[in-house]
Image (spheres, coloured by chain):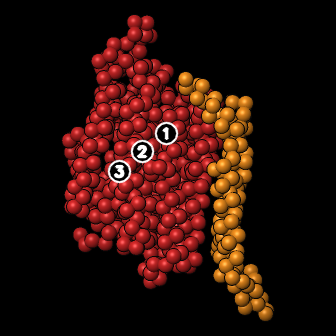
Amino acid sequence: MFEGGLYPYWIVIFLMMTGLYVVISRDNLVKKVIGLNIFQVSVIMFYVAMGKVRGGTAPIEAEGFTVFSNPLPHVLMLTAIVVGVATTSLALALVVRINEAYGTIEEDELRELEREEDA
Amino acid sequence: MIDLLLERVANDLPALQIAVPLLSAAICLVIRRARPAWVLAMVVAWGSFAGACVILSRVIHHGTISYAEGGWRAPWGIELRIDLLNALVLLVVTGICAIVLTASPRSLDQEIWREHHSKFYALYLLCMTGLAGMTITGDAFNIFVFLEISSLSSYALIAQGTTRRALTSSIQYLVMGTIGGTFILLGIGMLYMVTGTLNIADMAVQLAAVGPNRTVLVALACVGIGTGIKLAIFPLHIWLPNAYTYAPAIVTAFLAATATKVAYYVLVRFVFSVFGAKLAFDELHLDAVLMPLAIAAMFAGSIVAIFQDDVKRLLAYSSVAQIGYMVLGLSLVSVSGLTGGLVHLFNHALMKSGLFLVMAAILLRTGSTRIDAMAGLGRRMPLTMAAFVVAGLSLIGVPLTVGFISKWYLVTGAIEAGLWPVAVLILLSSLLALIYIWRVVEVAYFRSPPEDAPEIREAPPSLLGPIWVLAGAIVFFGIFTSLSVGTASAAAQMLLGVAQ
């Protein structure tokens, strides 16, 4: 664990809540996707902070290095980053299609259009 | 020579469940022609189903299968670990995949451009890969990876719907699903911090040594919320009705019977195998949260379903209610309760895929899934509607159908736990199911179609066949319960650590 106190985790929590708040509070779909990204990045930071050891290097055998960071959480996050990119690209593709179909990407206007459709 | 090859294949069956659909998805993309892509997907899906049958029988006769991926032994390498619980879920997932796929070409011709069919099958196989992977993996991080594979492909599948509403439903699901997936990832991270391992079996051992602390409790909360969103536990079900209503009919039949079921499996696996019943229910009182939510889902889902005019939407809300029964089974924390939950997983998969395939057939012939369009269908599509009635009776819980079996175990579980009011509520909510099924049956059988209604023929055999296989299974497993109940109760005993 990071020795300099728990402050990386406070940053993680701050980012996470920011991301969630953006997802909930914004009507613009692109902004929602950005919020989702911030939310995912906070978890990536969480894993990276967890694996880091102060003064530790990458786990490569070499003269003079005895303290190593845990590489596993860092490697896991490579996968998580790929997942994040895939999610974002799929979401943006959907936003483009929504814009073509409705002419807007504001969620309140979309809801309004759908209500008219139902009526 | 051939014996040797067969033996190799048999030993590698767990890995093939994931590898074959994954590679075939890529091949489907290259093929680009509808018919060959469908044939390939069919071979893969039925092959996976046959593999799942072999795996289940091996697990029943020889005990848990542990497969070291790439030869790296657990807990360092990634392990595929199949016990009674996930062998049963794997059987459900691959079986439904295969049956729904068999029915798909005619219905897809109506809803998706033919040149896109190969891509559709590629997505379908990817989703199947993710679901099968989530089910059989013994590695916590792997669950997240496969969850995202299945989720991303299901968002894309839902967006294929014919109306523009499919797009907004898909992005709504994407936003909620991603939040859910990320919460699961966060929970797994906290578990890794505490235990230093990602292997589920090893994690359980390490956690028992650590005992409850705040990190573990928060991890449980994160995993619970994450799976809760994917499972659509009331009130986290907001994405479900829209997604099921506007997705292509085939996609709805597929996802309704598999995606939420696998999420339920993940929740059960984490709660009972990783955290243990003692930690989850004695320390964190998970049952005090889940039981009221499950009962609220049973009623809210059914009541909203009664007032729907679109039958696909009606069935989607009914799914919310049925998920409530499954969660209720879990929250009873007893062998009968959990058996009821797991049997309902099996049974509800049969019922809902059957019902949604009926909707696909009706959509094919009438061009609508609205309840008014179903007037007089009882006479014009008698075989299709008869299947609807069979599955509908099962949804209500009439004896001789599978629905009765799961309700029986849930009621028994509630009474054993001394919760009489819960048992009464289960029966009352079944009456609500009677109302919404009756609404459809009444219109279909007792209302005559309008004078100017076009001539409607019975659904094509390619759809009727799978529908009646499912309807037959509903009755068969309602009478001969040894496979579903036997496996589920043995799995429940294993999860709760009760000697058989």
Subunit of mark 3?
B
Residue in front for this viewpoint, B420 or B496 = B420
Amino acid type at image mark 2: Val
**B203, A3: nearer the viewer:** A3
Q: Residue beneath label 1, please?
A: B241
Residue bearing the label numbered 2: B320
User: Which residue corresponds to mark 3?
Assistant: B295
- Residue B361 location (% of width, % of height): 43, 27
Looking at the image, which residue is at 65% across and 37% down?
A: A108
Q: Examine the rendered structure and indicate whether residue B474 appears above or below residue B455.
A: below
Say what amino acid the circle numbered 3 marks. Ile
Observer-nearest of B81 and B170: B170
- Locate the C terminus of chain B and report the quarter of the image it occupies: bottom left
Q: Chain A appears in which tint?
A: orange
Q: Colour of chain B?
A: red
Q: How many marks?
A: 3
| x and y, in percent, of residue B52 in the image | 41, 54
Question: Do badges 2 and 1 share one subunit?
Answer: yes
Is the Cβ of the residue at disc 2 closer than 8 Å to that at disc 1? yes
x then y, percent, for residue A3: 69, 85
Question: Dot 1: within a 10 Å radius of its alpha carbon, few (fewer than 14), some, or many (20 or more) residues?
Answer: many
Instruction: Give neighbour class at mark 2: few <14, some 14-19, many 20+ (Cα, 10 Å).
Output: many
Question: How far apart are the two marked residues, 2 and 1, measured between alpha carbons?
Answer: 8 Å
Secondary structure found at label 2: helix
Residue B200 on image: x %, y %: 48, 71
Q: What residue do we see at 45% from left, 28% from top?
A: B310
Label 3 secondary element: helix
Which residue is found at the position 31% from the left and 72% from the top?
B497
How far is mark 1 from mark 3, CA to CA?
18 Å
